[in-house]
Amino acid sequence: TSDMQGLQHEIARPAHAYFAMLALTVELCLKERIDFLDFGPTTLDPKLDVGGRLIPTRTGYYTHSVVLRSFIKGGLDRFR
């Protein structure tokens, strides 16, 4: 995901840039007294390293299309 922030992997990885960005984000949230920060579902280890914790989440999907609804239901049945 670091490439989505515009980081070049060859430079960012040795510098631990992704971890530094996460830590600075946490620092800013603490300074601004923000009590909840959603890091999202990717790259779990760095997020846990800066104090994140897993919480259960649920996602819902809806479409008016009967065809798409059957594909979604089929995918969810296989996912469980």
Image: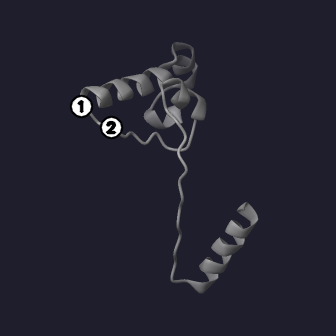
Residue 7 image point, x, y percent: 47, 27
Q: Using residue 7 as the reference point, say whether residue 13 is left or right of it.
A: right
Q: Using residue 79 as the reference point, say whether residue 58 is left or right of it.
A: left
The reply to whether the C-beta atoms of the residues labelled 2 and 1 are less than 8 Å apart is no
- Return the residue at label 2: 35
Residue 54 image point, x, y percent: 55, 40
Q: Residues within 10 Å of mark 2 (few under 14, many from 20)?
A: few
Is 71 in front, or is 29? 29
- Return the residue at label 1: 32
Judged from this view, the residue extending furthest toward the right is 78
Task: Identify residue type, mark 1.
Answer: Glu
In the image, residue 73 sits, relative to residue 7, either above or below, namely below
Residue 21 quadrant? top left
Q: Secondary structure at mark 2?
A: loop
Q: Secondary structure at mark 1?
A: loop
Q: Quadrant of the C terminus?
A: bottom right
In the image, residue 34 sits, relative to residue 26, either above or below, namely below
